Amino acid sequence: MSIIGRLKFIKRIQAYRPGFLGLVMNPDYITRRGLFKAVRSIAPLIKGNVLDFGCGSKPYEYLFVNATKYIGCDIQTSGHDHTESRVDVFYDGLTLPFSDATFDSVVSFEVFEHIFNLPDVLSEIRRVTKPDGYLLITIPFAYEEHEVPYDFARYTCYGISTVLQTAGYEVIKNEKSGGYLLAVHQMLMIYIVRLLPKSKLLFNSVQALILFPLTSFVLLLDLILPRHYDFYCNNIVLTKKRKEESSETPV
């Protein structure tokens, strides 16, 4: 592999599981670091036949070590191309091409903000999930518009919990990643990157000089200062499909 090819490979790795190099290479370091840690902690609970809904490149597939099968499903027309996607099955945005109760669990990462008809889609996800099956999602709270024009919503932790409960899910865990300080810093980093020169060499050089010291300093502050979560980066929600309530009247 060439040096350029190796650098591109490292950059792809640092995009979703940011380590030390992510401080230099990834302007979304705070958001992606929080997501990676949260998904990694929950992933062992997800077992059996798993559907990754809106899978893209399946960035977290390797974390689901207890999955016996991992199927990626996505929609053909979205706010990004599928050059680097690893989609097994495309669907029409209305009906998932799977039989009822096909999957033990469904996961979906940074997808629900791009769905305008979320209750309808949740009904389909629920249909293809087995009784008591898990649904694990992540969804942004503080982030810029992205994959436009297919960016429709932001949810508070209370909002997304209500939507999921109404759709027939029991919320087991609802976490927030990146508190007030980290979320504000994340937004600042994205803004600064938008101001950088278009030249790729200059862009990467200036980005590295800015990202590393500022993000390192804020991470240190986050260890010292009180944490508040009224403003934050992402919701990470683990739910379980509720059993259908019987409509029969007891005798």
Image (spheres, rainbow, N blue to C red):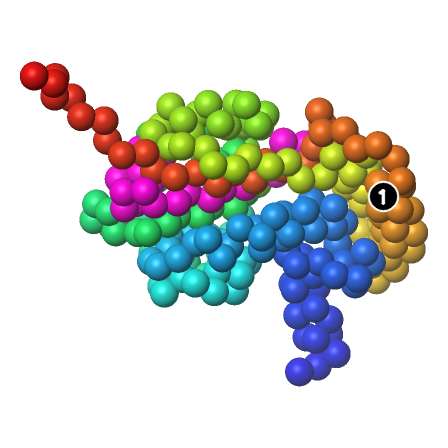
For label 1, count other residues whose C-alpha is less than 10 Å away and answer few (under 14), some (14-19) or many (20+): few
* Residue 249 in sight: yes
Residue 99 falls left or right of residue 14: left
Residue 170 picture quarter: top left
Going by the numbered disc 1, the residue's amino acid type is Leu
| Total marks placed | 1
Image height of 83 relative to 197, above or below: below
Residue, disc 1: 223
The percent coordinates of residue 133 (x first, y second) are: 34, 45
Q: Residue at x 68, y 47 (%)?
A: 34
Task: Assess whether residue 233 is covered by the magenta stretch.
Answer: no
Q: Residue at x 43, y 54 (%)?
A: 46
The percent coordinates of residue 165 (x first, y second) are: 40, 26
Q: Residue at x 64, y 52 (%)?
A: 37
* Residue 128 in sight: no
Between 84 and 222, the one lying in front of the other is: 222
Residue 28 falls left or right of residue 100: right
Q: Which of the image's four quarters has the N terminus?
A: bottom right
Image height of 105 relative to 14, above or below: above
Residue 10 picture quarter: bottom right
Between 122 and 246, the one lying in front of the other is: 246
Residue 209 falls left or right of residue 130: right
Q: Residue at x 36, y 65 (%)?
A: 68
Q: Which of the image's four quarters has the C terminus?
A: top left
Instruction: Spot the residue most to the front.
Output: 251
Image height of 112 relative to 38, above or below: above
The local secondary structure at tag 1 comes to helix
Instruction: Spot the residue most to the bottom.
Output: 1
The percent coordinates of residue 214 (x first, y second) are: 90, 47
Task: Assess whether residue 137 is covered by the magenta stretch.
Answer: yes
Between 101 and 172, the one lying in front of the other is: 172
Magenta highlight range: 122-146
